[in-house]
Image (tube, rainbow, N blue to C red):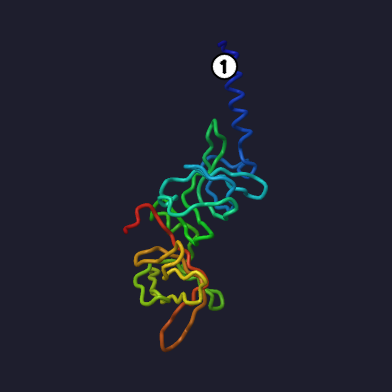
C-alpha cells in the first residue's frame, strides 16, 4: 500500500470517528466532567447507549456498576450518569461513568466509596421543614424506621409512608446497617419521639468496595 493510501485510510478513519461523536458531547474536551439524564436505548456488556433529547450518548460502565447482574436495564429506563468525556480516536467521544443512578430502583452505583461524598449529595439542606441529608444507616429499629448518621448528627427516618419500603422484603432496594444513603423528606418535630424525618424518597448508594 502506498503512503498516500495509508494517509487516506487514516484520514477516513479519523473522519468516521468524528461522525460518531454525539452532538450532545460536541465541543466538550477530553476529561470534561458532567452529569446528565437520559433514557436507555441499548445495553451491551460494558456500554449503555442513552437517548439525551434526540441524541445518542454512549456510556462506558465498569462491572461494579452492573452489580453482578442483580438488576437489568430495559429500553426507556431513566438513568442519571456522572462521569467524564473520553475522546477515543477511533470510537469518537463517549462518557466514562463514575456513577449511575437507576431511577426505577432508586439506587446509585459508584466506582468506589471515595466518590460518594462528591456525587450530588447535599447534607442538611432545609427549606421550610423539607430536608435532604446524606449519611450511613447505623441501626434499623423496626420495619418502618431506621437511624442515619450524617457525620454532624443522627436522625430517625420513617419510611412507612413510602410506596416502596426499603426495609421490607420486596423490591431491589433493601437497606442494611452500613449502607450509604440519601434521604429527602419532611422534618417531624414530635416532642415525644425526638427529631425525625418522614421520608418521601430514599436513595441508596452502592460501591464496589462496600463491606457485606
Left or right: 139, with 124 as reference point: left
Rendering coords of residue 178 (x, y %): 35, 65
Residue found at x 57% / y 35%: 92
Quick one: 82 or 168, which is closer to the camera? Answer: 168
Instruction: Give above or below for 64 relative to 197.
Output: above
Residue found at x 54% / y 31%: 89
Left or right: 70, with 15 as reference point: left
Instruction: Give above or below for 207 relative to 32.
Output: below
Quadrant, the C terminus: bottom left
Quick one: 139 or 124, which is closer to the camera? Answer: 139
Q: How many marks?
A: 1
Rendering coords of residue 182 (x, y %): 46, 66
In the picture, residue 87 is in which quadrant?
Answer: top right
For mark 1, what is the residue? 6
Q: Secondary structure at mark 1?
A: helix
Residue found at x 50% / y 69%: 164
Instruction: Give above or below for 81 relative to 179.
Output: above
Residue found at x 53% / y 40%: 30
Quadrant, the N terminus: top right
Residue found farthest to the bottom: 192
The 10 Å Cα crowd at callout 1, few under 14, some 14 to 19, many 20 or more, is few
Rendering coords of residue 17 (x, y %): 59, 31
Residue found farthest to the front: 170
Residue found farthest to the top: 2
Rendering coords of residue 125 (x, y %): 51, 70
Residue found farthest to the right: 54
Amino acid at each position: 500500500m502506498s503512503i498516500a493510501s495509508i494517509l487516506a485510510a487514516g484520514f477516513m478513519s479519523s473522519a468516521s470517528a468524528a461522525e460518531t461523536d454525539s452532538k450532545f458531547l460536541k465541543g466538550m474536551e477530553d476529561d470534561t466532567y458532567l452529569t446528565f439524564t437520559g433514557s436507555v436505548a441499548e445495553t451491551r456488556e460494558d456500554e449503555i447507549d442513552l437517548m439525551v433529547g434526540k441524541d445518542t450518548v454512549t456510556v462506558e460502565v465498569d462491572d461494579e456498576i452492573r452489580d453482578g447482574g442483580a438488576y437489568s436495564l430495559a429500553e426507556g429506563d431513566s438513568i442519571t450518569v456522572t462521569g467524564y468525556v473520553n475522546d477515543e480516536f477511533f470510537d469518537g467521544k463517549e462518557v466514562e461513568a463514575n456513577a449511575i443512578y437507576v431511577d426505577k430502583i432508586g439506587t446509585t452505583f459508584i466506582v468506589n466509596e471515595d466518590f460518594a461524598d462528591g456525587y450530588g449529595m447535599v447534607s442538611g439542606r432545609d427549606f421550610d421543614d423539607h430536608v435532604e441529608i446524606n449519611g450511613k444507616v447505623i441501626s434499623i429499629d423496626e420495619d418502618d424506621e431506621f437511624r442515619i448518621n450524617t457525620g454532624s448528627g443522627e436522625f430517625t427516618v420513617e419510611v412507612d409512608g413510602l410506596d416502596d419500603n426499603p426495609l421490607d422484603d420486596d423490591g431491589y432496594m433493601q437497606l442494611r446497617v452500613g449502607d450509604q444513603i440519601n434521604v429527602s423528606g419532611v422534618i417531624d418535630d414530635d416532642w415525644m419521639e425526638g427529631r425525625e424525618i418522614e421520608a418521601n424518597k430514599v436513595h441508596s448508594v452502592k460501591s464496589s468496595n462496600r463491606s457485606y
